[in-house]
Image (cartoon, rainbow, N blue to C red):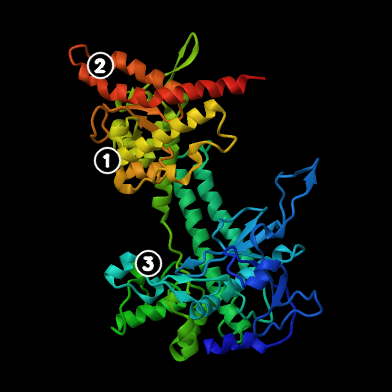
């Protein structure tokens, strides 16, 4: 019976340690409670229910309707709509409600989670240690097992379905309603969770230092950072392993006699070295099972306990391995589907992405896209080859380029970097036929909105653009000529690219492709297009001007709007 409700939370006592206030953002509460927004107190086995109206045991649940029943104050006869942090907390615990494994994180300083993420809030006066006590239990393999037993499986990702998949690849829906029934152990400790939090911050700081534009990167610096990052990650794996086994003791699932815990000298661990992985590797070697666990997590299966570990820890792991093999209860918990996967990009991929972002940032330097004139900076479009020549004189760029792509020429590197970071300015080079039709409908809507603005109808609500029937359909991937355009524009065609291109055909990016900076205003883009019309077209072949004239036609309505906007911003 779900491991006897986790051994009746080790004692089924009435202890009243701190617990959680949980906010269910889905609003899927019962009608009576959801309408009242009142506080309910419930408790899981082993913790008892909160008594006397204020005991901090059990789970304190905030069942709230939209707007949390907040009544806006009235100032000078009108509702005061200024922002207020109603019910805000300095800290809260959030988790993804659809995932293969349970992941609980601590948010600090009033950080706001995604609106789909369930949020656990402790009492306003709860300390950080109280949060870490709860985090340690929630992120344990024991609780992951319990949640999967009590939650609905949503199957496997399509890629896993095609190749068969394994139990640890199944996706679950972890709801806040189920979490309310979670039994907590009588004793909690913040130590492991606090240490994991500190180590995670240190790992982030290593990457943040590399990403800082002010950091001068060298091969030696990256090598030292790599060693530091791997050490921190290995330390986190080791601490998480001890947290899992200490949680078994706190739930009373294993004896509190130090046989399976209580070793002071815990070495760093890499993936493949945890006790359950040694058991799994032995079963694979014996032909008792098959798994892709080690391949998928880029780890080596180890059937023997490493010799370089301290003798005390070697003996401890030997006892843990024996316990897993002999104890069906531990064998059930110590499985890949309940253990933290540590599945993320490796160091090389992380650093490669950071170097790429830094190089792209240097590609947006204003000196590349403006020329100084008597009237100030004048926008100028350049070919990839011209940008390459200018960047080859930039010491910071060349140094980063040597680390990112040591075997590529400057032009080759730029073509690779910018291939998926630009979108053609001309609509026919951006959309397929269906996309052009949608674009046309959006342009008609914008024209109607401009007419309504000119007639003063927008604020009165009498404009025909307010009808839901006039809203054009959203864009789809199939509406764009290239997947990279869809990635940069999305379903509402909102520009998020770094650069725009002015080619005359839908060919791949090359050294001759002419680019402009996406940060230009509409007037600056139009100015750059006019310059291109003068320099890039020939009187012998006037058809060369057609794509640029199409771009200019797209830009003209927005240049007028941009001019009006500038006039308004300078108007006192």
- Disc nearer the start of the sequence (1/3): 3
Where is mark 1, residue-wise? 432
Residue 175: % across, % down: 54, 71
Is there any visible trace of residue 152 in the rendered image?
yes
Q: Is residue 427 left or right of residue 172?
A: left
- Distance from label 2 to label 3 (Cα)? 58 Å
Q: Residues within 10 Å of mark 3 (few under 14, many from 20)?
A: few
In what element is the residue under mark 1?
loop
Q: Nearer the viewer, mark 1 or mark 3?
A: 1
- Whether residue 399 is visible to the viewer of this picture, yes or no, is no
Task: Specify whether 393 is left or right of 412.
Answer: right
Which label is found at residue 129?
none
Which label belongs to residue 537? 2
Q: Nearer the viewer, mark 2 or mark 3?
A: 2
Q: Is residue 26 above or below residue 10?
A: above
Q: Is 406 positioned to the left or the right of 67 in the image?
A: left
Mark 1 to mark 2: distance in Å?
26 Å
Quarter of the image holding residue 253?
bottom right
x, y percentage for residue 421? 37, 38
Q: Which residue is mark 3?
A: 299
Task: Write the residue at 37% across / 38% down.
Answer: 441
Answer above or below: position of 46 versus 63. below
Determine crowd level at label 2: few under 14, some 14-19, many 20+ residues with C-alpha closer than 10 A: some
| Local secondary structure at mark 3 | loop
Q: Given the current orientation, which residue lies at the most extreme left position?
A: 540
């Amino acid at each position: 019976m779900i491991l006897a409700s986790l051994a009746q939370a080790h004692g089924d006592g009435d202890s009243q340690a701190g617990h959680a206030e949980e906010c269910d953002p889905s609003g899927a509460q019962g009608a009576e409670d959801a309408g009242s927004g009142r506080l309910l107190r419930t408790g899981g086995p082993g913790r008892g229910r909160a008594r006397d109206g204020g005991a901090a045991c059990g789970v304190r649940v905030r069942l709230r309707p939209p707007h949390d029943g907040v009544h806006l104050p009235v100032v000078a006869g009108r509702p005061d709509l200024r922002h207020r942090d109603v019910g805000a907390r300095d800290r809260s615990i959030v988790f993804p409600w659809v995932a293969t494994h349970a992941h609980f994180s601590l948010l600090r300083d009033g950080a706001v989670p995604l609106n789909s993420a369930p949020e656990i809030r402790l009492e306003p006066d709860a300390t950080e240690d109280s949060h870490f006590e709860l985090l340690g239990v929630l992120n344990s393999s024991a609780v992951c097992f319990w949640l999967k037993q009590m939650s609905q499986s949503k199957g496997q990702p399509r890629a896993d379905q095609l190749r068969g998949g394994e139990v640890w690849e199944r996706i679950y829906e972890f709801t806040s309603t189920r979490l309310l029934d979670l039994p907590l152990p009588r004793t909690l400790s913040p130590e492991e969770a606090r240490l994991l939090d500190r180590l995670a911050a240190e790992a982030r700081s290593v990457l943040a230092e590399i990403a800082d534009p002010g950091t001068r990167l060298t091969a030696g610096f990256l090598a030292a950072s790599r060693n530091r990052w791997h050490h921190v990650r290995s330390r986190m794996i080791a601490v998480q392993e001890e947290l899992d086994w200490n949680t078994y003791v706190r739930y009373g699932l294993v004896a509190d006699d130090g046989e399976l815990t209580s070793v002071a000298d815990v070495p760093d661990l890499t993936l493949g070295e945890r006790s359950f992985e040694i058991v799994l590797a032995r079963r694979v070697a014996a032909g008792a099972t098959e798994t892709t666990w080690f391949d998928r997590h880029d780890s080596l299966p180890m059937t023997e306990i490493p010799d370089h570990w301290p003798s005390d820890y070697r003996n401890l792991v030997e006892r843990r391995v024996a316990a897993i093999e002999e104890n069906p209860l531990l064998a059930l918990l110590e499985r890949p589907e309940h253990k933290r996967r540590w599945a993320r990009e490796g160091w090389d991929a992380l650093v490669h992405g950071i170097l790429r972002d830094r190089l792209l940032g240097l590609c947006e330097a204003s000196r590349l896209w403006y020329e100084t004139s008597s009237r100030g900076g004048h926008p100028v479009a350049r070919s990839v080859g011209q940008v390459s020549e200018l960047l080859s004189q930039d010491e910071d760029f060349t140094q980063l380029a040597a680390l990112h792509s040591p075997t590529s020429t400057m032009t080759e590197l730029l073509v690779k970097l910018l291939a998926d970071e630009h979108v053609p300015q001309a609509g026919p080079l951006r959309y397929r036929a269906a996309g052009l039709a949608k674009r046309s409908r959006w342009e008609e809507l914008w024209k109607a909105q401009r007419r309504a603005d000119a007639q003063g109808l927008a604020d009165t609500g009498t404009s025909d653009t307010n009808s839901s029937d006039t809203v054009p359909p959203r864009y789809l991937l199939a509406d764009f000529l290239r997947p990279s355009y869809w990635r940069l524009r999305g379903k509402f065609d909102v520009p998020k690219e770094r650069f725009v291109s002015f080619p005359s055909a839908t060919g791949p990016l090359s050294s001759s492709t002419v680019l402009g900076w996406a940060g230009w205003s509409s007037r600056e883009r139009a100015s750059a297009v006019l310059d291109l019309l003068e320099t890039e077209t020939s009187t012998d072949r006037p058809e060369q001007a057609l794509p640029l004239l199409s771009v200019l036609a797209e830009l003209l309505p927005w240049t007028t709007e941009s001019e009006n906007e500038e006039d308004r911003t300078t108007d006192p």
